[in-house]
Image (cartoon, helix red, strand yellow):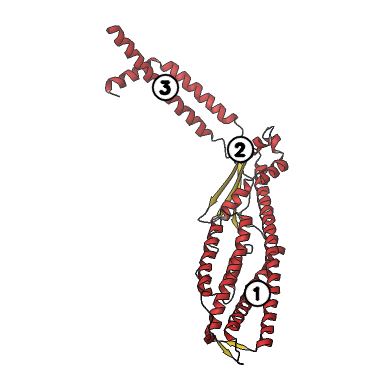
């Protein structure tokens, strides 16, 4: 805008100053009245931290087991875990919890809503769930016209979250215990079968003493087979909880694939007479060596699996009975002493700013039209 344009603008302001002032005063009075007539909303919140006490994790049990060797040590098992903060946030905003809140506080009446889905929308609009991944903290906040009810609603959210998390954990623990129990008893049956097979073989053909290198190789092979079985158990658990499209499920498939490659390398090795020492002479030794090696390896696998499975199975039984807090409370919900909204000054200043913008546009258009008409008559 040049100097001439500014002078024209100021002249128009001067010309319409009375109307502008009256409108300004009117806008100021109306915005102030609106700011003070709007209902007061109070805000209460609580800060929680997910408990570090986790439920049963097969991977953790494997890593804690003695004698873990080979590829198992290099696998990033259990590295892909969903954020507890996002998980808790999803539960808090779930329909299940929303319905409980609506029933508890009669929110259809409070929000003056006829339908449940509209009431849920209103509740979620007045519920603030924020996460701080750096500090691993979650804030649960609620706006309400009654300061005490705002506190009670936050408190109810916390109770519902704790109850729901524990119910989900308990259900998962029961499923996991059932799967582990089935596999554990199957292991006992198979272990006895191979023990009986070895005893029967030795009674029939005599004693064979495996070479130390063969024993060491077989132990690594058995270790890998046991790890694979446990990873498959965990894969089944993940599939039932977070689904087969989750990153954790895909990671488990990769881990099983890596172990399969290692197992394949061991299975390609052939059994030779140098791997054993005979206490008796046998004419058909080569065929018996293969038969014995299979029994010996299967027996080692079942023994190794028992070594891993038993502590996990016992841990699963403890987890099923355990009832722990889902989170630690950092800040308890409180009764707010001062309103959180409306922001009265913000409403007033926003109204004035919008009015001034309107004045600027109005005068600019007015000036343009005046100039256009003037030029038209001049021509």
Q: Nearer the viewer, residue 4 or 83?
A: 83
Q: Earlier in the sequence, mark 2 or mark 3?
A: 2
Q: Is residue 370 left or right of residue 204?
A: left
Residue at 59 percent of width and 31 percent of height: 38
In this rendering, the label closer to the viewer, 1 or 3: 1
Occupied quadrant, residue 95: top right
Q: Nearer the viewer, residue 83 or 131?
A: 83
Place of residue 369 in the rendered image (x, y in percent of width and height, measured from the top left): 36, 14
Is residue 328 in view from this perspective? no
Residue for badge 2: 41
Is residue 30 in view from this perspective? yes
Residue for badge 3: 359
Occupied quadrant, residue 271: bottom right
Q: CA distance from mark 1 to mark 3?
A: 84 Å
Q: SS at mark 1?
A: helix
Place of residue 121 in the rendered image (x, y in percent of width and height, measured from the top left): 62, 37
Residue at 54 percent of width and 58 percent of height: 250
Residue for badge 1: 306
In the rendered image, the quadrant that contains the N terminus is top left
């Amino acid at each position: 805008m040049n100097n001439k344009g500014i002078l024209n603008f100021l002249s128009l302001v001067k010309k319409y100053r009375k109307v502008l002032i009256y409108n300004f005063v009117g806008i100021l009075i109306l915005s102030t009245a609106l700011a003070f007539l709007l209902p007061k909303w109070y805000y209460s919140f609580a800060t929680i931290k997910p408990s570090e006490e986790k439920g049963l994790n097969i991977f953790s049990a494997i890593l804690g087991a003695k004698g873990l060797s080979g590829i198992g040590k290099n696998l990033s098992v259990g590295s892909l875990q969903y954020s507890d903060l996002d998980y808790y946030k999803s539960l808090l905003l779930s329909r299940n919890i929303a319905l409980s809140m609506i029933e508890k506080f009669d929110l259809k009446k409070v929000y003056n809503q006829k339908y449940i889905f509209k009431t849920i929308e209103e509740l979620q609009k007045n519920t603030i769930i924020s996460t701080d991944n750096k500090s691993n903290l979650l804030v649960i906040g609620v706006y309400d016209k009654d300061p005490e009810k705002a506190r009670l609603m936050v408190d109810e959210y916390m109770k519902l979250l704790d109850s729901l998390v524990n119910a989900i954990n308990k259900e998962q623990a029961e499923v996991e215990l059932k799967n582990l129990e089935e596999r554990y008893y199957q292991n006992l049956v198979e272990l006895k079968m191979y023990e009986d097979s070895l005893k029967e073989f030795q009674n029939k053909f005599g004693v064979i003493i495996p070479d130390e290198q063969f024993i060491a190789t077989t132990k690594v092979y058995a270790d890998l087979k046991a790890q694979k079985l446990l990873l498959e158990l965990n894969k089944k658990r993940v599939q039932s909880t977070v689904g087969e499209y989750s990153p954790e499920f895909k990671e488990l498939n990769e881990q099983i694939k890596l172990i399969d490659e290692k197992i394949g390398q061991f299975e390609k090795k052939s059994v030779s007479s140098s791997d054993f020492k005979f206490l008796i002479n046998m004419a058909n030794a080569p065929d018996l060596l293969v038969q014995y090696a299979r029994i010996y390896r299967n027996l080692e696998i079942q023994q190794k699996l028992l070594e891993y499975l038993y502590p996990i199975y016992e841990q699963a039984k403890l987890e099923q009975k355990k009832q722990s807090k889902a989170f630690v409370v950092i800040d308890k919900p409180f009764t707010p002493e001062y309103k959180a909204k409306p922001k009265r000054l913000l409403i007033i200043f926003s109204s004035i700013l919008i009015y001034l913008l309107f004045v600027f546009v109005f005068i600019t258009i007015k000036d343009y039209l005046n100039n256009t008409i003037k030029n038209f008559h001049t021509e």
